[in-house]
Image (tube, grey):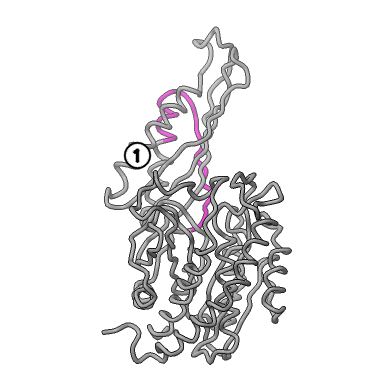
Amino acid sequence: MDAKSDQGVGDDLAGRWRAELEASLPAAIALRREIHAEPDISGLEEPTSQRFLRALGNPPAEVVADTGRLVRFGPPGPSIGLRAELDALPITEISGAPYASTRPAMHACGHDVHLAALFAVLNSARELDLPLGLLGVLQPREETGATGAGDIVAGNHLIDHELRALVAAHVQPQVPAGQVASEGGPVNASVDEIDIVVSGKGGHGAYPHLAVDPVPVLCRIVLALQEAARSTVNPLHAAVVSITQLQGSAATNVIPGTATGAGTVRVMQASDRTLLHERLARTVTSIAEAHGCTAKYEIRRGSPALVNDQRLAFGTRAWLDDFGFPAASFASCGSDDFANYGVQLPILMQFVGTGSPAGNPEMSGPMLHDPAFLPGDHVVQEVALALLAGYLGAVSSAF
């Protein structure tokens, strides 16, 4: 059965909307360049929100998560949401573009493109007779642990708008240019940070027999955690344990009393999350005790795994096909706080390709978070069409 048929939305609406969207592109690209040149980092996005609203003609907007906004068009009642992120990264840009950042911050993750695309969709919907409300979600603090998505969910702001589904689109240089990955199921991992503290007995570096050195114990733990992950999680499920920080003594001739490590734990399946942490904690404490030390394993939980709704993905893919976007496949152990919305309603994250046509990362240029990352202006239209496909797909799938 055609996912587009008999559900209150047709090709005539899509055609009119696309025409209006194309007319909005010059303003959207100008907005993208302004936002890129004057980025705001996480928690300080108020100027970006105001700039977006001014470009949109200052419609009524609800403040959420301190610096975010909700902007609604269309009829009252149930609505479909489209989300874009406001924040930049504390990176110094080296792209050399004429509209390069003028600040010690940069939109190195494509959020400027996402915002411009959302503007194009919202601006082009003003005069249309929409079947459901259209809610633009300008979300702050995607790049930090204190996520804006979590705050918006906790505040029940989306429930107040009778939101039926929420769609996002993210540029992705690991997907070939001109293609869109919009598959159902897990597409991003949960993300937790861990801290390990191993305590022994400090002493002089010349007399290790009079001390209990926690440093080699911590090193054994780091190696053992990789094996623990491999032997705990189903090999068909993705799981990553990366210990990225180690610290012992500040002096070369001092055996420290404690040694610390920190890192990230990521899984794609919710059922693996608790299971893996339990195994890692046992590994840490047992190795420490076996070598005369004590240890603590602490977890700082982040966003859950991002799981795309299957029905929403199916409905959206029908419109992406109609718009001429070949299907791509992409999932990674990267994370996005967009996953937090999934605890309340169906969600869909799409990945819009900016990579080499062959899909070879080595030929795709700078990756996300690279100080030279700069998608072309044409990607604004592609992301906008992916968002539009998400709205139409949600409506045609009877959300």
- Front residue of 26/383: it is 26
- Front residue of 315/110: it is 110
**How far across and how far down the image is residue 133, in percent?**
54, 85
Q: Which element type, helix, strand or loop, lies under badge 1?
A: helix
Asked whether 134 falls inside the magenta stretch, the response is: no
- Location of mark 1 (residue): 228
Is residue 273 visible to the viewer in this orientation of the structure? no
Q: Quadrant of residue 154?
A: bottom right
**How far across and how far down the image is residue 111, in percent?**
57, 60
Q: Is residue 44 left or right of residue 346?
A: right
> Where does the magenta region start and end?
284-303
**How far across and how far down the image is residue 388, in percent?**
47, 77
Which three-letter amino acid code belongs to the residue tagged 1? Ala
**Label 1 neighbourhood size at 10 Å, few (<14), some (14-19), many (20+)?**
some
- Front residue of 105/279: it is 105
Asked whether 294 falls inside the magenta stretch, the response is: yes
Q: Residue at x 67, y 52 (%)?
A: 101
Q: Quadrant of the N terminus?
A: bottom left
Is residue 303 visible to the viewer in this orientation of the structure? yes
Q: Residue at x 40, y 26 (%)?
A: 290
**How far across and how far down the image is residue 39, in percent?**
67, 56
Q: Is residue 232 left or right of residue 46?
A: left
126 above or below 87? below
